């Protein structure tokens, strides 16, 4: 499992555990606001990232982590990793493709093959073995599940859900959809679908498809019906505190994991991007992203088929500036962009599971080890296709598997 963690995470407030000390003049209050993922004591003063009035009540550490220690203590932290770009979509592409292409822009599919396509083409995985759970349909997120490369493309792509759009906004339209009788009604519907698909010719060919088998399509339909029932009855497997898009996204990702037991799933989080104008909202979102990832790991460890057989990699697409912009929020705290080419390229990667040593920290400030594209090759390494991915020739120079850097 790969979590593209949170949408521009400043190094100081995350693995640096500095809270306000390196960001807000006159507020020398440090501490760890990500204590499900990271090992360290929480702040004791100026609490504004939790629940309740003014965010004064930190979300309690999840029970599993009280018993077993932080995710860091259960795995390996690369504490100083190099990002390759300061832009969100370029950063996400660098994680998914394992490459940084300066001309890669919004509203464009990845130029190079994605980890999803590598897994399906070279690893032989089926469509429902590979999933991408996005946190929305803005910023071209739905384009990341396969590339425009002619040798790979849609037939090797991942199944994609933007769950809040599909299961919340789409509830009235799809939640009560008609179920067609497989003998009398389904065949005419498929003929109509084929007619409509072939009306959109691309260079003389009909539309390509992800290649879900008939059985996989039925599994997806059953899953969607189940999700609509859970939304109606409010029985989703959500984090205990779910008051952000990221928390809901992770809740649906947990449902995908336990229902399909995929070989690989990628989840995108981005609520911390509010840091451009609201530092209070940023630390609040960072605290909840930690809570959400902790919940996801709890779900995995509670499932007999997944526990002991699943690894997790968390990595931001880029960091944030060393110096603030001129926007002040309601707590009189300064906001931060991501453009400076130094601090905004400082990231980290946290990983746990059977593939990784426990309680190991690699790298330090001034000692950068690894780069953002390493996450993709690490997934390929764990699932047995590292040589095929390297041999395809599209990786960014200097890309390694994190496993080779341990």
Image (cartoon, helix red, strand yellow):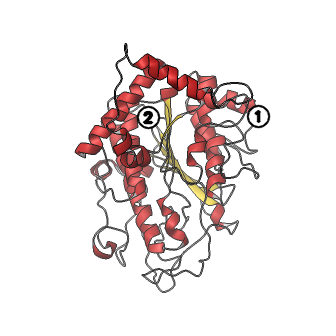
Q: Residue furthest left?
A: 233
Circle 1 packing at 10 Å, graded few (<14), some (14-19), many (20+), is few
Contact between marks 1 and 2 (CB within 8 A): the answer is no
- Give the quarter of the image for residue 228: top left
Q: What percent of the width, then of the height, locates residue 193?
A: 52, 26
Identified at 46% across, 84% down, the residue is 332
| Residue that carries the numbered disc 1 in the rendered image | 393
212 or 332: nearer the eye? Answer: 212
Image mark for residue 310: 2
* Residue 106 visible (yes or no): yes
* Residue 36 visible (yes or no): no
Q: Is residue 24 left or right of residue 252?
A: right
Image mark for residue 205: none
Real-space Cα distance between discs 1 and 2?
28 Å
Identified at 76% across, 34% down, the residue is 393
Q: Is residue 197 above or below residue 283?
A: above
- Give the quarter of the image for residue 11: bottom right
Secondary-structure class at tag 1: loop
Secondary-structure class at tag 2: loop
Q: Is residue 54 above or below residue 132?
A: below
Which quadrant, please, contains the C terminus? top right
- Give the quarter of the image for residue 310: top left
Circle 2 packing at 10 Å, graded few (<14), some (14-19), many (20+), is some
Identified at 34% across, 59% down, the residue is 243
Identified at 52% across, 79% down, the residue is 334
């Amino acid at each position: 499992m790969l979590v593209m963690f949170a949408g521009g995470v400043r190094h100081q407030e995350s693995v640096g555990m500095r809270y306000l000390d390196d960001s807000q003049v006159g507020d020398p209050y440090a501490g760890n606001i990500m204590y499900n993922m990271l090992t360290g004591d929480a702040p004791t003063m100026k609490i504004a990232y939790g629940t309740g009035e003014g965010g004064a009540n930190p979300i309690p550490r999840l029970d599993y982590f009280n018993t077993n220690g932080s995710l860091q203590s259960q795995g390996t932290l690369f504490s100083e990793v190099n990002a390759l770009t300061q832009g969100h979509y370029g950063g996400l592409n660098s994680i998914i493709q394992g490459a940084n292409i300066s001309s890669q822009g919004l509203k464009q599919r990845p130029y190079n093959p994605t980890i999803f396509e590598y897994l399906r083409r070279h690893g032989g995985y089926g469509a429902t073995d590979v999933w991408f759970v996005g946190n929305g349909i803005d910023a071209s997120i739905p384009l990341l599940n396969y590339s425009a490369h002619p040798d790979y493309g849609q037939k090797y792509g991942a199944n994609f859900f933007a769950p809040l759009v599909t299961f919340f906004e789409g509830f009235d339209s799809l939640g009560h959809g008609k179920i067609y009788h497989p003998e009398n009604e389904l065949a005419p519907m498929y003929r109509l679908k084929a007619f409509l698909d072939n009306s959109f010719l691309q260079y003389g060919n009909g539309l390509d498809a992800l290649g879900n088998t008939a059985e996989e399509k039925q599994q997806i339909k059953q899953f969607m019906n189940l999700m609509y029932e859970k939304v109606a009855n409010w029985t989703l497997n959500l984090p205990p505190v779910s008051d952000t898009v990221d928390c809901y996204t992770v809740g649906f990702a947990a449902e995908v994991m336990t229902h399909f037991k995929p070989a690989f799933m990628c989840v995108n989080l981005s609520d911390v991007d509010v840091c451009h104008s609201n530092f209070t909202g940023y630390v609040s979102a960072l605290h909840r992203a930690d809570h959400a990832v902790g919940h996801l790991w709890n779900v995995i460890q509670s499932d007999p088929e997944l526990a002991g057989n699943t690894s997790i990699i968390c990595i931001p697409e880029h960091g944030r500036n060393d110096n603030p912009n001129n926007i002040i929020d309601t707590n009189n705290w300064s906001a931060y962009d991501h453009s400076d080419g130094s601090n905004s390229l400082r990231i980290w990667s946290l990983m746990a599971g059977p593939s990784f040593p426990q309680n190991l920290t690699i790298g330090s400030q001034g000692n950068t080890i690894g780069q953002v594209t390493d996450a993709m090759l690490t997934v390929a390494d764990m699932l047995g296709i590292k040589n095929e991915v390297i041999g395809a020739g599209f990786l960014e120079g200097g890309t390694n598997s994190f496993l080779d850097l341990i």
